Image (cartoon, rainbow, N blue to C red):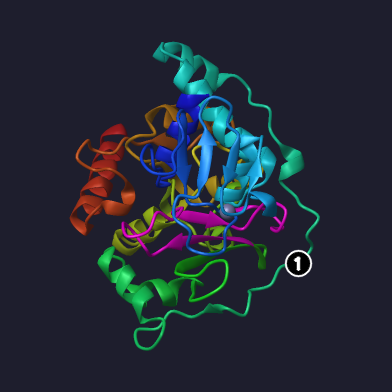
Amino acid sequence: MKERILEFFKRYNIAVKRSGVGVAQHHININCPYCDKDEKFTMGIDLKTGKFGCWWGKDRGHAGVNFYKLVAKLLDVSLKEAKSILGMRVMLEGEADFKNSINKMFEPRVLEVEGEISKVKKIQVPEEFKTIRKDGTTGRFWTYLEARGIDPLILTSRYTIYCALQGRYAQRIIIPYYYQGQLMSWTARTIRDGRYEDIRYKDLSVGESIIHVKHLIYNYDELVRDSGDGLFFCEGVFDCFNLEQHLPLGYRATCISTKSMQTAQIGMIKKLSKRYKTLYLLLDEDAMMETVGIGSELRCFVNNLQVLMLPSDIKDPGSMSEQQVQNLVRGIEEKACKAD
Ligand SMILES: [Zn+2]
């Protein structure tokens, strides 16, 4: 239990206080997600049991015995998702033997079809979502993109992108996901790197989405109308943004928003495989096992998929320079020439 809890906070980059004033023995403290004021590290978590409680708001419901409930609150996901988030990691951690883990990944996964389509029929862009402009109150989002090496002008003209100054998604860049012309869900990336311990990506929950982002392919509608030599599948939406601004003509990129594959996504990828000569799977450097797993799963459905590994000096496709992207494509094309 202890390792699982600590691993969770580490992985999601959530600040914890491990000792000092207000931290009980065998406990850690975090900023209470139920508190709407800026109370610092008021929530204690018992590392042995997962029980949690905030000293400021214990009688206001800021407490519980079920750690999953806290995870669901922190990540803004359903209880079921919280369980799978923690469960998946444990399976991987528990496997000391690499080969054994790979075999596990090849086993047919129980797919949660139930979670894919929610009861929500229509969602709308909230009023607080604004267009990102260079000047004025949304200027800081523009600057954030520039700092990440993403050209804001290209980005905002190419995709539908919003930002929020207030509300649940304050200080986040919002990336809506559409399917068949309809808004299905969105994910929201914080622009407060480093200074605040925010969750990097906050998705609209399964219950509030028509189809959750983790079941969709980003920018699918446009990609399925387009065609070309290659389509890259990366993990995160910023990987996709970065690749698309550097890729030569004829190549496109998208993201799967997850390290595992969902049924609905497989259906979309099958359709996309008919529009592009080759599909390339290009996940982050630390997702080697997941890449092998997804690759083998997809090859059952599409026959033009290639799994690519990033050069060891590159962490993720989002951090690749224009030159590195071009080298990658050149390498692919040279290999294809030799194969012909
Ligand atoms: Zn609280």
Instruction: Pick whichever, 224 or 167, lies toward us.
Output: 167
Specify the amino acid type for callout 1: Lys
- Residue 234: x and y in percent read 42, 47
Q: Position of residue 195 (x, y in %)?
A: 32, 60
Q: Given the current orientation, which residue lies at the most extreme front position?
A: 21
Residue at left offset 34%, top offset 34%:
286
User: Which image quarter has ligand 1?
Assistant: bottom right
Q: How many numbered circles does the render carry?
A: 1
Classify 165 as above or below 209: below
Task: Please say if 124 is above or below 117.
Answer: below
Q: Secondary structure at mark 1?
A: loop
Q: Which residue is mark 1?
A: 122
Question: Residue at 58% of width from left, 47% of height from top?
Answer: 214
Quadrant in the picture for residue 189: bottom left
Q: Could you say which is closer to the camera, residue 115 or residue 300?
A: 115
The answer to which of 220 and 109 lies nearer the viewer is: 109
Left or right: residue 205 compared with residue 251:
right
Q: Residues within 10 Å of mark 1 (few under 14, many from 20)?
A: few
Image coords of residue 140 (percent x, y): 35, 77
| Residue stretch in magenta | 185-213
Q: Residue at x 76, y 67 (%)?
A: 122
Q: Is residue 297 above or below residue 167?
A: above
| Rendered location of residue 193, percent (x, y) | 34, 59
| Quadrant of image for the C terminus | top left
State whether label 1 is within 8 Å of ligand 1: no
The stretch drawn in magenta includes residue 210: yes
Indicate whether residue 86 is drawn in magenta: no
Q: How would you classify the magenta stretch by its main secondary structure?
A: loop
Q: Is residue 18 above or below residue 126?
A: above
